[in-house]
Image (cartoon, helix red, strand yellow):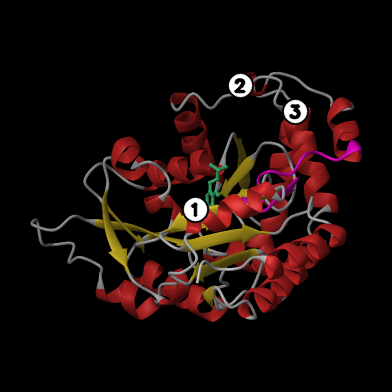
Amino acid sequence: MIDFRSDTVTRPTPEMLKAMFAAEVGDDVLGDDPTVIALETKAAAMFGMEAALFCASGTMANQIAIKAHTQPGDEVICHKLSHVYYYEGGGIAMNSGASVCLLEGDQGRITAADVAAHINPPADPHRPLTKLVSVENTMNKGGGSIYDFNELKAIGKVCRENGLKYHLDGARLFNALVETNETPTEYGKIFDSISICISKGLGAPVGSVLIGSKEFINRSRRIRKVFGGGMRQAGYLAAACIYALDNNVERLRDDHRKAKQLESLLQSLPYVESVIPVQTNLVFFKLKPEMPTVQFLRTLRENDIHAMALAPQEVRFVTHLDITDEMMVKVEKILKGIVTNR
Ligand SMILES: Cc1ncc(COP(=O)(O)O)c(C=O)c1O
């Protein structure tokens, strides 16, 4: 099976499983799982931040951060297609009782000027109190787009000047970092909190980490407990995450190479309308009206290729560590062989 649905579908490799089996564990809710502590210490050090918290998912890490940074009735500024708003089940409203201010922006990226223009006057009791800005890098619905780091710094400056907290949904941050050669420490300097996912391109079966100050992480630990996210012998999962951080970051470039290969192939196909410019491992493309999505996906499935439609006539292919070069050859042959009805 060639599975382009997401980079979350990867299976642990034998080496990763070996690391998991060998993990020393305790009870993380009681605070004594040495492997979880090692992962949290490693993640915090990597970003030059004080502390970190192992979470069950990226959604949990983001939602904990939003709750830790806001009070009910406060407002969160983010892009209208950001995962925290668009794909987390209304969590901002349900978990934090917060309001949102949704911005537009090129391939899912917001700007410092737009953020500054949308901060509500704090003295005006009619308007929700702007408290938090959340950005996503890479930006999933933006086609895996990468932020210009100077823009992220400029947004950070606006946040500091206006007393706002600044959160990064870095589910795929490492995909950005291998392309730009920026470092996690540079990111740690400008954000109040960062969530990273280890179960996406990095290949762990489960796990995200929320990173920030000691005080923020202490509050987040309490919220994680309330969300039901305290896990006991979580060290087995943390061991996979440590293995992934040590071994699977640099190889993300290979996923990007394959995504670029898909981009050029798709651009050459008569039934493809357009492809969002590819920067990392996400390939979003639009099919022409004469190629109905259902028919396209069915034909792929008949050839053991799986992908997802995320909007009418829009399909996403995601490359990851279980996609081989042999698979790419087969995919090229199948895609070139598909014909439209007309
Ligand atoms: C940008 C982004 N943030 C957060 C998440 C949430 O991660 P999870 O599926 O682990 O909850 C995803 C998942 O695809 C994502 O793409």
Residue 4 is covered by the magenta coloring: yes
Say left or right for 98 vs 237: left
Q: Residue at x 51, y 75 (%)?
A: 153
Residue under label 1, please give it: 294
| Quadrant containing the N terminus in the rendered view | top right
Residues rendered magenta in the picture:
1-14
Which mark is first along the chain, 2 or 3?
Answer: 2
Element carrying mark 3 = helix
Q: Is residue 140 visible?
A: no
Say left or right for 245 vs 173: right
Kind of residue at badge 2: Val
Q: CA distance from mark 3 to mark 2?
A: 11 Å
Residue 116 is covered by the magenta coloring: no
Which mark is first along the chain, 2 or 1?
Answer: 2
Numbered badge on residue 235: 3
Vertical comparison of 127 with 302: above or below: below
Element carrying mark 2 = helix
Instruction: Choose mark 1 or mark 2, whichever is in front.
Output: 1
Name the residue nearer the viewer: 81 or 101: 81
Residue under label 2, please give it: 29
